[in-house]
Image (cartoon, rainbow, N blue to C red):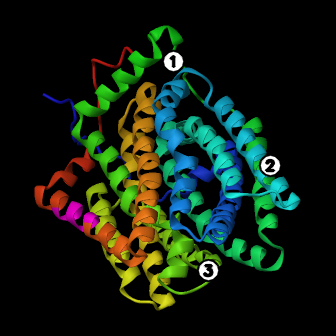
Amino acid sequence: MSPIQEDPLLPKRHGSLRALRHRDFAYFWTAAAISNAGGWMQVVAVPALLYDMTNSSTWLGVSSMAGLLPAVFLTPYAGVLSDRMSRRKILMITQTVQMMCAFILWGLYLAGSISPGLIVSIALIGGLATGFQTAAWQSFVPLLVPAEELLDAVKLNSVQFTLARAIGPGFAGLVVSTLGTGAAIFINAITFLLVIGALALSRPRQIISAASQGKVSDVIKAGGSFVWRHRPLRLVVFLAFITSLCGQSLQHIAPAIANRIYERPSTDNAGLLVALGLGALTSSLFSVALGDHLKRSSRVVVALILFSVSTAMIPMTSIYWVGLLAYFISGLAHLQSAVALNTLIQGTVPDHLRGRTMSFYVLGILAGIPLGAFILGRLGDIFTMRVAVFADAAVLFAVVVLLVSRGWLNDLNTTKIEDVETTAL
């Protein structure tokens, strides 16, 4: 019998802001919010530049795959690494690499030497850093607060990301229109220094697993086996993949959607992504205020329905404000889904398995986004962007019907996951 159980002694319900009382978490949270806002500026500026250079939505998909696909192969190894060595050190290295990539991209742009191939190549290098970083980042945040405030920190980490997503694209539109694309890339590059500084000042409470526990490949298999044996964890990975494939991928082809569906300049992808960020920010504020009162299964059901509705709205008309509303609703959906799935892992999985388990969750996200962006981009070039997005909405709606009709989402409400076969690994 599976040792997944409902805990009769539920924790006291409360809001999430109290985690910011801790210096290390407050510094890291603030630096990450600013740096992620800079990252979103580049997400707006560079794809619009690439689309204008190529007039191809397929190139947008290729760029997305270059930036994220390496992480698909590296993330399982990175999960083991984040359990075996300092997560702070991993983040220091990966943040430095990504900062260098941004500065190189900025230099090439200023020199007039930028090309689609170089954009994709630099994205590939950044993608390698992302592969090592994401699992370490997600499992690093809980180390900055006491155990009883772990879920508060996880929720606020989602809030800072969504806050950045609301602010970054708006600033990108302003900066690109006044100072140019190069300025947006440069601002992103210098914001990495804030995170590096916050990491240098932090003193995380990490228990590092011994490397003598076995070969990396064996530890990965053990982590994968742990996830596979428990249906809530399998469901988390699947939901991370499908919401990224059919939902989050839309942000990476936003320049083509702005141009081909709404007949606007590609740089109006900034407006779509601002709407996405504002939706996520609104949702995150609701999540913080609500605290733990809403069940994970309820959050995910609402999120999946909103994802389906918003995706179907995008190709229905050429009216730009409808697109803005659709992206806003998509932002609402993404935050609720992320909070539910992330807190399940962070709050129910033992610490010595958290990095590996988180790596499979991240794997679902990192596999879904570039694959979805490439498929949508390619279908948009072969058929039309409207057809591509309608097909995307149909797939997502079918998944919603399947999950809700089978009642599988109730498994997300579990409060404890243990496994005696892997506790010694």
Which is in the foreground here, disc 1 or disc 2? 2
The structure residue drawn at horizontal position 50% and vertical position 82%, both measured from the top left corner, is 324
For the C terminus, the quadrant is top left
Q: Residue at x 44, y 38 (%)?
A: 358
Q: Which residues are magenta?
A: 395-401
Badge 2 amino acid: Ile
**Residue 256 picture location, percent across and down:** 53, 73
Q: Nearer the viewer, residue 43 or 208?
A: 43
Q: Pick whichever of labels 2 and 3 is earlier in the sequence.
A: 2
Whether label 1 touches label 2, CB < 8 Å: no
Mark 3 nearby-residue class (10 Å; few <14, some 14–19, many ≥20): many
Q: First in sequence, mark 1 or 3: give its number.
A: 1
Disc on res. 104: 2
Which residue is found at the position 62% from the left and 65% from the top? 47
For disc 1, the marked residue is 209
Indicate the secondary structure of the residue bearing disc 3. helix
Label 2 element class:
helix
Give the mark nearest the N terminus, 1 or 2: 2
Q: CA–CA distance between discs 2 and 3? A: 25 Å
Up-down: is 269 above or below 214? below
70 horizontally vs 396: left or right: right
Give the amino acid at mark 1. Answer: Ser
Which quadrant of the structure image shows residue 385? bottom left
